[in-house]
Image (cartoon, rainbow, N blue to C red):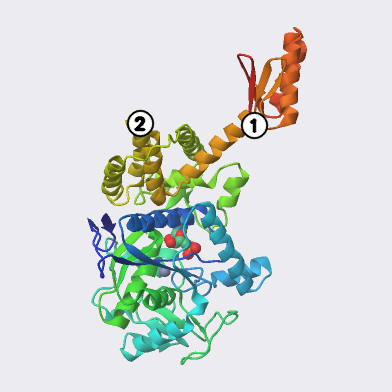
């Protein structure tokens, strides 16, 4: 595939260190709160990328951390630990908070058809790994101790700003975030590898280390976990665009200094989901969750459909109107697929192969998921059998994961059940959604009409309308549905 690489600022053919195998790493959630639908936009797009690479035939090893320690309120190593903040908010221990929100994250992923990575590693489970790397960095002269903490010395690098389409002044973290700089730092870009004695003395989770009891910085966890499970040659690193600096910049600095050679060749950054008032953010406290969408009557897969309609390198603006439009389009798509009938003949393999190639070329152009959606409609319009169409749609859905065939089958079954449950009386047939009490009321309305008691017939129609039931008269009876 052709993929944009934030490191080179170019779209180029995707290549891997070992042919046929992708070592892929994803920055996981900070589990001090529910993931918001912005975070989940990043995970949806990364999920499609992984599935696309598998569809191309790669063997993918995808690794993800769970940040359950060390991520401070400011990316500049200041402020309080986000996990402690969550624990205090809910009067629970840090580990209780971590478990609860990790479970909630994977439940959300499941509702959005996001596959669980091959390896999921909580940061607290790899402390020895970080200690090994920090020791190595100190031995090689890339780190120093000050004020009880261990810092990475950014002045030892020839190039620190690797994603360098930025202005250095804008990136000075203290200035950017309006927070006080840490006076222990020798250079403005130095960052903490290991905290010991510091202002975070009430940190709940602490471990012994050669530098005293303490805990790891946020960036070291991703380097440690990736080096452990992906090895020294990482092919693809993913995250939201806000992670590029300082988090990914610092990951590269410490990983390459430690291993002594280039680490990850390709960086994939998903742009933000914004609301009219700016970036959706957990720390602002006001954000939308998958559960909230469900409570409001949205199918989580309508949100996935909404995300796939736009390109991952463009900011996406969320509004209820936009989501309504996506849900409407998604439901219509399912209805069209439900209308296809398997005819018992085999799928046309040549047609299937032709579509497979088109999908690989079009979606493979920098993960153009909206082209993938367009192709679904092209298949529906194609001059081929319904069986072939269903087979092709199933192939594409292996990457898009919109549950197209499952939802269409459920809709067919619902219609069939309703037909089977049709009620007939005196030659008047009522077809609905399988609710005997409503069938009876619609039959009563039919009888009232036959008896020319139109006032009673209208009264029953209004009564059912108030319950969200719509009646349509058809020859020989009536059909009802919930609207
Ligand atoms: P966090 O749980 O804050 O560590 O973030 C988890 C992931 O979501 C990271 O890859 C972030 O870069 C990403 N992210 C955060 N906010 C947004 C947003 N509004 N839209 C898309 N991705 C986001
Ligand atoms: Zn990370």
Extreme-front residue of the structure: 345
| Position in image of residue 426 (x %, y %) | 72, 15
Work out whether residue 281 can be spotted.
Answer: yes
- Residues packed near mark 2 inside 10 Å, few (<14), some (14 to 19) or many (20 plus): few
Give the total of numbered labels.
2
Q: Tell me the distance, in whole angstroms, between the alpha carbons under discs 1 and 2.
A: 29 Å
Q: Nearer the viewer, residue 429 or 187?
A: 429
Residue 63 numbered tag: none
| Position in image of residue 30 (x %, y %) | 51, 66
User: Is residue 77 toward the left or the right of residue 433 in the image?
Assistant: left
The quarter of the displayed image where residue 449 is located: top right
71 above or below 10? below
- Residues packed near mark 1 inside 10 Å, few (<14), some (14 to 19) or many (20 plus): many
Q: Nearer the viewer, residue 294 or 17?
A: 17
Quadrant where the image shows the C terminus: top right
- Which residue has dot 2 on it? 381
Q: Nearer the viewer, residue 393 or 79?
A: 393
Q: Earlier in the sequence, mark 1 or mark 2?
A: 2
| Position in image of residue 172 (x %, y %) | 36, 68
- Which residue has dot 1 on it? 433
| Position in image of residue 219 (x %, y %) | 42, 74
216 above or below 330? below
1 above or below 351? below
Q: Is label 2 in a helix, a strand or a loop?
A: helix
Extreme-top residue of the structure: 452
Work out whether residue 483 can be spotted.
Answer: no
Q: Confirm or deny contact between disc 1 and disc 2 (CB under 8 A).
A: no
Q: Is label 1 in a helix, a strand or a loop?
A: loop
User: Is residue 27 toward the left or the right of residue 474 in the image?
Assistant: left
445 above or below 419? above
């Amino acid at each position: 595939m052709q993929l944009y690489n934030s490191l080179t600022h170019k779209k180029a053919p995707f290549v891997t260190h070992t042919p046929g195998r992708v070592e892929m790493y994803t920055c996981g959630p900070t589990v001090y709160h529910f993931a918001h639908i912005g975070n989940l936009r990043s995970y949806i797009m990364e999920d499609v990328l992984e599935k696309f690479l598998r569809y191309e035939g790669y063997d993918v090893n995808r690794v993800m951390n769970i940040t359950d320690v060390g991520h401070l309120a400011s990316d500049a190593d200041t402020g309080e630990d986000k996990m402690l903040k969550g624990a205090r908010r809910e009067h629970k221990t840090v580990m209780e908070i971590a478990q609860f929100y990790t479970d909630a994250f994977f439940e959300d992923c499941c509702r959005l058809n996001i596959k669980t990575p091959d390896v999921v590693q909580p940061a607290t489970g790899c402390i020895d790994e970080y200690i090994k790397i920090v020791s190595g960095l100190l031995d090689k002269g890339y780190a120093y101790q000050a004020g009880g903490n261990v810092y990475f010395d950014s002045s030892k690098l020839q190039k620190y700003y690797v994603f360098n389409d930025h202005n250095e002044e804008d990136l000075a973290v203290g200035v950017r975030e309006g927070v006080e700089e840490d006076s222990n730092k020798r250079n403005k870009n130095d960052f903490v590898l290991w905290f010991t004695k510091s202002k975070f003395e009430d940190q709940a989770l602490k471990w012994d280390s050669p530098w005293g009891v303490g805990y790891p910085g946020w960036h070291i966890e991703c380097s440690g976990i990736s080096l452990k499970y992906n090895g020294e040659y990482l092919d693809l690193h993913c995250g939201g665009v806000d992670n590029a600096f300082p988090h990914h910049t610092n990951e590269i600095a410490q990983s390459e200094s430690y291993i002594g050679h280039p680490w990850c060749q390709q960086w994939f950054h998903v742009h933000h989901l914004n609301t009219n008032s700016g970036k959706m953010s957990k720390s602002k406290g006001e954000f939308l969750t998958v559960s909230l969408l469900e409570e409001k009557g949205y199918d989580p897969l309508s949100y996935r459909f909404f995300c796939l309609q736009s390109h991952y390198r463009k900011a996406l603006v969320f509004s209820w109107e936009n989501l309504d439009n996506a849900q409407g389009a998604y439901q219509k798509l399912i209805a069209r697929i439900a209308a296809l009938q398997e005819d018992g003949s085999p799928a046309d393999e040549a047609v299937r192969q032709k579509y497979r190639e088109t999908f690989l070329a079009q979606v493979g152009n920098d993960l153009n998921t909206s082209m993938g959606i367009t192709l679904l409609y092209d298949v529906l319009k194609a001059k081929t059998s319904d069986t072939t169409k269903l087979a092709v749609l199933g192939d594409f859905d292996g990457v898009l994961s919109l549950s197209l065939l499952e939802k269409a089958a459920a809709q067919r079954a619902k219609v069939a059940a309703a037909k089977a449950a049709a009620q007939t009386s005196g030659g008047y047939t009522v077809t609905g959604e399988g609710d005997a009490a409503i069938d009876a009321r619609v039959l009563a309305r039919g009888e009232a009409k036959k008896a020319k008691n139109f006032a009673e017939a209208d009264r029953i129609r209004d009564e059912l309308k108030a319950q969200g039931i719509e009646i349509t008269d058809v020859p020989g009876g009536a059909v009802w549905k919930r609207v």
